[in-house]
Each structure stands twice: as C-alpha cells, then as structure tokens.
C-alpha cells in the first residue's frame, strides 16, 4: 500500500531560486522551518515544501514523496524505473522513481 508522504520539493534553477524563496516567504507568507545555502523548507499545512537550488537545471521540477511498507515491492508493482542516481538516499530505505510524465517520486519506508 502506498500513501502520500509529508514532503514536496521544488527543484529550482539557480537563477530563479532567490525570487522563488522570497515569493513563498514574503508573498505567500509561509513560515520557514529550516534554511541553508541551497535549500529552504517551509511549513505547508501538514507537509513541508522544500525549495532547493539546482546549479545545472533549466526549469523547475516538482518532486513528491510516497510512503510504503515495502518500497521494493511497490516499485515493482508501479512498473516505474528505479532512478536512485538522482540524489543520495542517506539513511532512507527506498528508491527514487518517476511517473510517466517524469515527476520524480521518492518511494520510501516510513522511519
């Protein structure tokens, strides 16, 4: 069984990152939960919206998190490609994958 996770990530090109962070912080007025040089995490209801700066990217990508008891089995059930090369999965049991439209999904086990 797959359920929605608590994280949404916007992967934003370097040249649009500061304006995007300012938009969510100053105009939408989301509360900042965490910030570093390359990422800002905002409270987004029960979820966290991560705005990540990506050095070599030309457009914004939306990445979603899905939770599953058995990520390996669910990845096979989805028939989606395993894309673990996208980002390190340090301390996370699961896989990066994508839907048919190319939206990146983190399919992982709850901690």
Image: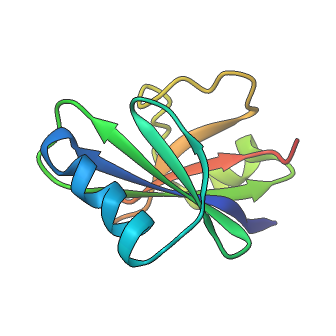
The percent position of residue 73, horizontal first and vertical second, equals: 75, 47
- Above or below, 64 relative to 109: below
In the picture, measured across the screen, residue 83 lies left or right of residue 13, that is right
Quarter of the figure with the N terminus = bottom right
Given the current orientation, which residue lies at the most extreme front position?
A: 26
In the picture, measured across the screen, residue 86 lies left or right of residue 79, that is left
Tell how many labels.
Answer: 0
Answer yes or no: is residue 74 visible.
Answer: yes
Which color scheme does this rendered protein use?
Answer: rainbow
Please tell me which residue is depicted at 81% across the width and 45% down the height of the picture: 109
- Above or below, 85 relative to 99: above
Please tell me which residue is depicted at 32% across the width and 39% down the height of the picture: 53
The percent position of residue 110, horizontal first and vertical second, equals: 85, 48
Please tell me which residue is depicted at 67% across the width and 66% down the height of the picture: 47
The percent position of residue 56, horizontal first and vertical second, equals: 17, 31
In the picture, measured across the screen, residue 87 lies left or right of residue 67, that is left
- Above or below, 68 relative to 83: below
Quarter where residue 103 is shown? bottom left
Quarter where residue 91 is shown? top right
Quarter of the figure with the C terminus = top right
Answer yes or no: is residue 102 visible.
Answer: no
The percent position of residue 84, horizontal first and vertical second, equals: 50, 30
Please tell me which residue is depicted at 74% across the width and 45% down the height of the picture: 71
In the picture, measured across the screen, residue 36 lies left or right of residue 62, that is right
Quarter where residue 86 is shown? top left
């Amino acid at each position: 069984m797959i359920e929605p996770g608590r994280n949404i990530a916007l992967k934003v090109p370097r040249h649009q990152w500061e304006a995007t962070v300012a938009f969510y912080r100053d105009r939408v007025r989301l509360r900042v939960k965490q910030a570093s040089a390359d990422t800002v995490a905002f409270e987004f209801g029960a979820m966290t919206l991560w705005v990540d700066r990506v050095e070599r990217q030309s457009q914004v990508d939306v990445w979603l998190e899905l939770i599953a008891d058995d990520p390996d089995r669910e990845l096979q059930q989805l028939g989606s490609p395993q894309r673990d090369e996208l980002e390190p999965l340090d301390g996370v049991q699961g896989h990066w994958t994508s839907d048919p439209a190319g939206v990146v999904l983190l399919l992982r086990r709850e901690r």
